[in-house]
């Protein structure tokens, strides 16, 4: 599974004072929620279904190879579709797609499923290393990835970046344990159900941090902002 893509920033609107795209440039539109879900999780679902169907029809190894082949193809199609709609691809999605193409290609060429199994380790480990390395240099690399989807204060970005960095490294470590201890079928179930489940639980646990560190909307005339009265919990954070 690719690391979760940050929400796409809302389109600019000249009526609210934001900058409109220059004349003559192609402005992309944000993916709708269902399309975003299909882009992020569709290739993995195709891999999962194809493997189990292929294993039942032709055996373990053909199931792995068929699933990997369609996984690579579906990932390419998903990235192309996201670019066609939004006129851009999220940087981490692009890196993850490249890892899928390389390791998936090696899996098919060498007929060895080990390469596709280490994909979550490399993708999550790379993301975690980049986020934590950025913090050591005094930068929150999560902030440019999120764009305008979140508006946190400096402390909020630092804490959220640290948590995501540690989470990604934890996922990388868990994948290594799973792929070494489980057979391919059990590992794929862990990858498809376990990692996605852990990610959603992690997202839910970040709600208090987002509520505490979300900046109040401009023009409120005070530091409290909507829903941030004395002792309040703060505004509900954007979905992440």
Image (cartoon, rainbow, N blue to C red):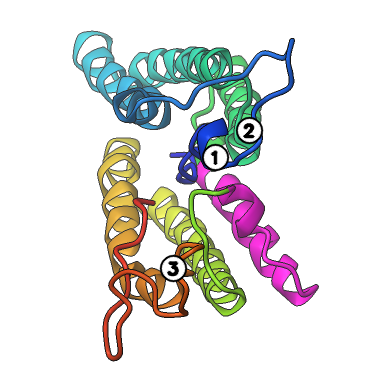
Question: Residue at label 2?
Answer: 99
Q: Are marks 2 and 1 in contact (CB under 8 Å)?
A: yes
Residue nearest the viewer, comparing 233 with 160:
233
Q: In the picture provided, is 193 more to the left or to the right than 130? A: left
Q: In the picture provided, is 49 more to the left or to the right than 168? A: left
For residue 119, which numbered disc appears in the image? 1
Q: Residue at x 40, y 12 (%)?
A: 66
Q: Which one is earlier in the sequence, the residue at label 3 or at label 2? A: 2
The alpha-carbon separation of the residues under discs 2 and 1 comes to: 7 Å
Q: In the picture provided, is 202 more to the left or to the right than 88? A: left
Residue nearest the viewer, comparing 40 with 129:
40
**Rendered location of residue 126, percent (x, y):** 65, 52
The alpha-carbon separation of the residues under discs 1 and 3 comes to: 46 Å
**Rendered location of residue 208, percent (x, y):** 32, 75
Mark 1 nearby-residue class (10 Å; few <14, some 14–19, many ≥20): many
Q: How many marks?
A: 3
Residue 240 in view: yes
Report the magenta residues as a range: 119-147
In this view, the residue farthest toward the bottom is 231
Q: In the picture provided, is 207 more to the left or to the right than 14? A: left
Q: Residue at x 58, y 45 (%)?
A: 123
Question: Residue at label 3?
Answer: 220
The label nearer to you, 1 versus 3, is: 3
SS at circle 3: loop
Q: Which one is earlier in the sequence, the residue at label 1 or at label 3? A: 1
Q: Which one is earlier in the sequence, the residue at label 2 or at label 1? A: 2
In the displayed structure, 161 sits above or below 187; it is: below
The quarter of the picture where the N terminus appears is top left
Mark 2 nearby-residue class (10 Å; few <14, some 14–19, many ≥20): many
SS at circle 1: helix
């Amino acid at each position: 599974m690719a690391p979760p893509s940050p929400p796409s920033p809302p389109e600019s609107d000249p009526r609210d004072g934001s900058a409109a795209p220059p004349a003559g440039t192609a402005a992309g539109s944000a993916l709708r929620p269902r399309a975003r879900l299909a882009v992020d999780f569709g290739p993995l679902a195709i891999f999962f279904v194809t493997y189990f169907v292929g294993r039942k029809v032709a055996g373990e190894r053909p199931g792995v190879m068929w699933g990997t082949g369609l996984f690579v193809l579906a990932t390419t199609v998903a990235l192309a579709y996201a670019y066609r709609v939004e006129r851009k691809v999220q940087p981490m999605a692009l890196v993850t797609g490249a890892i899928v193409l390389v390791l998936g290609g090696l899996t098919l060429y060498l007929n060895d499923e080990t390469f596709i199994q280490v994909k979550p380790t490399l993708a999550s480990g790379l993301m975690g290393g980049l986020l934590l390395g950025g913090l050591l240099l005094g930068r929150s690399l999560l902030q440019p990835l999120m764009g305008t989807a979140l508006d946190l204060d400096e402390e909020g970005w630092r804490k959220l970046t640290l948590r995501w960095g540690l989470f990604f490294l934890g996922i990388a470590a868990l994948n290594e344990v799973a792929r070494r201890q489980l057979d391919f079928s059990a590992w794929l179930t862990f990858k498809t159900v376990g990692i996605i489940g852990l990610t959603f639980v992690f997202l839910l646990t970040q709600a208090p941090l987002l509520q505490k560190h979300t900046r109040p909307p401009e023009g409120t005339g005070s530091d409290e902002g909507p829903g941030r009265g004395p002792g309040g919990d703060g505004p509900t954070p954007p979905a992440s």
